[in-house]
Image (cartoon, grey):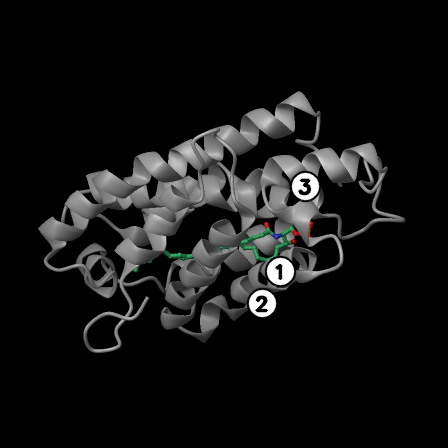
């Protein structure tokens, strides 16, 4: 994932969301989680103000990585096999968190909801004017997605942190894929793959009535 100077390039991170979908439209958990780890590196580069976000996201990634390297690892190869295994074996709390507070299904659901935010945020950056405010793009995409699942205190902390975001051009530069124009093209190429992963996951979770897991 390192670029020429050991720098970090968003294109390579977003490509993992492309490679995680198989020909049978299954989502491979390994690349999915690697994609998330890469995103967290970007988040960390935005400063300590987002550490409450990266801490939570990393904890969830870690839970999933443990399943993927644990005793039942073959059940956690794809999202589809995970859902099948956990649902069939009663490993998912559906009413309130109790016996299985950290099921793979509820953990991925949190990341899945955040992926919708990411998709909307990057789309906003891509289509925004040069002088658009990233804090506004970020707040709008957050309010339209993740915020619906967060209590007031987290919404408050998130929107305060968003005010510290750098300008649109600075963002496009941090992506490390060339000029702002090149970054915009890269986002146009990469975003359909994120949408695809999001769509497959949403459909799978809807089929199994898992979209509201506590
Ligand atoms: C660019 C700025 C990024 C801002 C991140 C936006 C998301 C804000 C979310 C704040 C929530 C964090 C606190 C914890 C919440 C949990 O309660 C909640 C539910 O979990 P649980 O176990 O209590 O039921 N957790 C979540 O909703 C998961 C949230 C994960 C958020 C992961 C965000 C990852 C962000 C990556 C940024 C990539 C930037 C890409 C662009 C880079 C361009 C150079």
Q: As rendered, which of 186 and 50 lies closer to the eye?
A: 186
- Can residue 61 be seen from the camera position used here? yes
Occupied quadrant, residue 187: top left
Residue 119 location, x and y as percent? 38, 41
Residue 165 location, x and y as percent? 34, 62
User: Of the residues under marks 3 and 1, which one precedes in the sequence?
Assistant: 1
Q: Report how far apart the C-alphas of labels 2 and 3 lie in the structure.
A: 24 Å
Q: Is residue 54 left or right of residue 195?
A: right
Occupied quadrant, residue 123: top left
How would you rate the neighbour count of disc 3 (Cα within 10 Å): few for under 14, some for 14-19, many for 20 or more?
Answer: many
Q: As rendered, which of 107 and 25 lies closer to the eye?
A: 25
Name the disc covering residue 82, or none: 3
- Which residue is under mark 2? 55
User: Of the residues under marks 2 and 3, which one precedes in the sequence?
Assistant: 2
Q: Which secondary structure lies at badge 1?
A: helix
Residue 175 location, x and y as percent? 25, 60
Q: Is residue 168 left or right of residue 66?
A: left
Q: Residue at x 40, y 73 (%)?
A: 47
How would you rate the neighbour count of disc 1 (Cα within 10 Å): few for under 14, some for 14-19, many for 20 or more?
Answer: some
The reply to whether dot 3 and dot 1 touch (C-beta < 8 Å) is no
Q: Is residue 197 left or right of residue 202?
A: left
């Amino acid at each position: 994932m390192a670029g020429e100077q050991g720098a970090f390039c968003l294109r390579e991170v977003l490509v993992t969301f492309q490679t995680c979908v198989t020909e049978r439209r299954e989502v491979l958990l390994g690349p999915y989680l690697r994609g998330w780890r890469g995103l967290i590196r970007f988040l960390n580069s935005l400063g300590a103000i987002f550490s409450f976000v990266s801490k939570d996201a990393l904890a969830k990634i870690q839970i999933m990585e443990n399943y993927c390297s644990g005793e039942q690892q073959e059940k956690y190869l794809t999202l589809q096999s995970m859902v099948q295994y956990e649902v069939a074996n009663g490993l998912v709390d559906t009413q309130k968190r109790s016996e299985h507070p950290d099921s793979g299904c509820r953990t991925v659901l949190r990341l899945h909801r955040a992926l919708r935010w990411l998709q909307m945020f990057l789309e906003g950056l891509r289509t925004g004017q040069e002088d658009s405010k990233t804090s506004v793009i970020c707040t709008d995409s957050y309010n339209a997605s993740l915020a619906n699942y967060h209590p007031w205190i987290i919404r408050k902390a998130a929107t305060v942190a968003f005010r510290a975001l750098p300008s649109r051009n600075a963002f496009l530069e941090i992506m490390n894929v060339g000029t702002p124009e090149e970054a915009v093209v890269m986002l146009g190429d990469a975003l359909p793959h994120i949408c695809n992963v999001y769509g497959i996951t949403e459909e799978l979770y809807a089929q199994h009535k898992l979209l509201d897991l506590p």
